[in-house]
Amino acid sequence: MGDVNIPKTPRGQETMDKICRASEELFSQKGYYNTSITDIAQRAKVAPGTVYIYF
């Protein structure tokens, strides 16, 4: 996990988990190349910039 910022708080870990779950769901539905950061952020109910903070 060299390109991931490890969360320092339980809340941060929850946010990262939401992003990961949303990513997995969307990648399986739409494929990796057809999934955007905006798609992931919307599914995870976070701002697009939040995805970039962690990844």
Image (cartoon, rainbow, N blue to C red):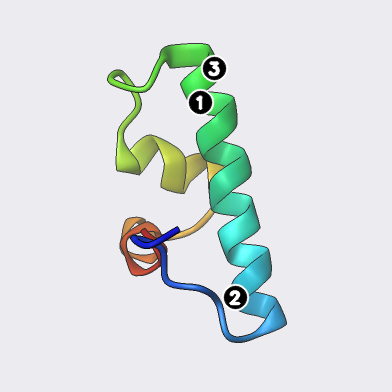
- The residues bearing labels 2 and 1 have C-alpha atoms spaced at a distance of 21 Å
The percent position of residue 8, horizontal first and vertical second, equals 58, 85
26 is higher (above) or lower (below) than 49: above
In percent of the image, x 45 and y 58: which residue is there? Answer: 1
Circle 2 packing at 10 Å, graded few (<14), some (14-19), many (20+), is few
Classify residue 14 by image quadrant: bottom right
Amino acid type, residue under disc 1 in the picture: Leu
> Mark 2 sits on what residue?
12
Circle 3 packing at 10 Å, graded few (<14), some (14-19), many (20+), is few
Q: Secondary structure at mark 2?
A: helix
Indicate which disc, 3 or 2, sits on the residue closer to the N terminus. Answer: 2
Amino acid type, residue under disc 3 in the picture: Ser
Q: Report the quarter where the C terminus lies.
A: bottom left
Tell whether 23 sits left or right of 25. Answer: left
Q: Secondary structure at mark 1?
A: helix
Residue closest to the eye, 28 or 5: 5
Indicate which disc, 2 or 1, sits on the residue closer to the N terminus. Answer: 2
2 is higher (above) or lower (below) than 31: below
Query: Marks 1 and 3: in contact by CB < 8 Å?
Result: yes
- The residues bearing labels 3 and 2 have C-alpha atoms spaced at a distance of 24 Å
> Mark 3 sits on what residue?
28
The percent position of residue 10, horizontal first and vertical second, equals 71, 80
Q: Residue furthest front?
A: 2
In percent of the image, x 39 and y 65: which residue is there? Answer: 50
The percent position of residue 12, horizontal first and vertical second, equals 59, 75
Residue closest to the eye, 20 or 2: 2
17 is higher (above) or lower (below) than 10: above
> Mark 1 sits on what residue?
26
In percent of the image, x 64 and y 70: which residue is there? Answer: 13
Q: Secondary structure at mark 3?
A: helix
